[in-house]
Amino acid sequence: MEMSPGRPDILVACATAATAAAHAHLLSSEELRRARRYAPHRAQEFTAGRALLRWALERSLGRWTRTCRIGATDRGKPVLVDLPDTGISVSHSQGTIAVAVAGGRTVGIDVQGPVPPTPGLLRRCCSPAQQRELAALPAERQGVAVARRWAIHEACAKATGTTPINLPAPYPGPLLADSGSRRGLRWRVLHPLHGAAVCVAYDDRPQPPATLALALLAPHRAPDPRPHPPEDGPTSR
């Protein structure tokens, strides 16, 4: 997959939950009402996810998208009601939010913080060969390595609209592989924020290779209240 600075086929955006939630003004009035019905933690999580998704939609589609309706399939996969050919996906983990917008493709995204390598989790997301690779890693790296494999598992499930427990055997390949493909899907592991693994998966139809862009939403900086000296140069009246 090619990383593209221009208008990409797939845009991945990441931010901390607090940073994304500070852009709540991007939500629709219905989404704001919905957020108020949740408990505080869930309200921030929902607000952050929708704010970052609308921020990414605006940059990916090149249009104002605050009024674009966001629905869900009967399995909970988010969809754009007015633009059903544009794939979208949202994920959150341990205070990190990740979203993906894909023009003309189905897409799934997952973000995971370090995950303890429990036997049950390893059986679901790591092959025997990958488990042997994991055992050879220093203990402090194992949680991040498992997070990568679980993010791959979850992102592919979201792309297909199924659930991780119903996916086939763990995806093959080296434990720390950054990309791969299987059963019509391609996936790519990213590391946009320290300690978090992000995987984006999408349908691999016969066409030119997909281009991918990664955007990080920076914290909002309040204006500096201190006076600044005038700049040299001509002034306008």
Image (cartoon, helix red, strand yellow):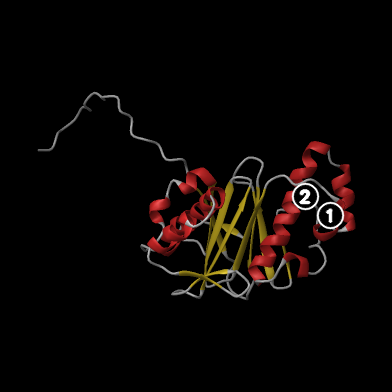
Q: Height in image: 159 above or below 121?
A: below
Q: Residue at coordinates 82% horizontally, 60% vertically from top-left?
A: 124
Q: Height in image: 168 above or below 110?
A: below
- Amino acid type, mark 1: Leu
The answer to whether residue 179 is seen in the rendering is: no
- Local SS, label 2: helix
Picture quarter containing residue 28?
bottom left
Q: Residue at coordinates 52% horizontally, 65% vertically from top-left?
A: 9
The answer to whether residue 70 is seen in the rendering is: yes
Label placed on residue 146: 2
Q: CA distance from mark 2 to mark 1?
A: 8 Å
Label placed on residue 122: 1
Nearer-the-camera pick, 174 or 140: 140
Q: Residue at coordinates 65% horizontally, 66% vertically from top-left?
A: 158
* Residue 100 image offset from top left, x and y in percent: 55, 60
* Residue 61 image offset from top left, x and y in percent: 42, 64
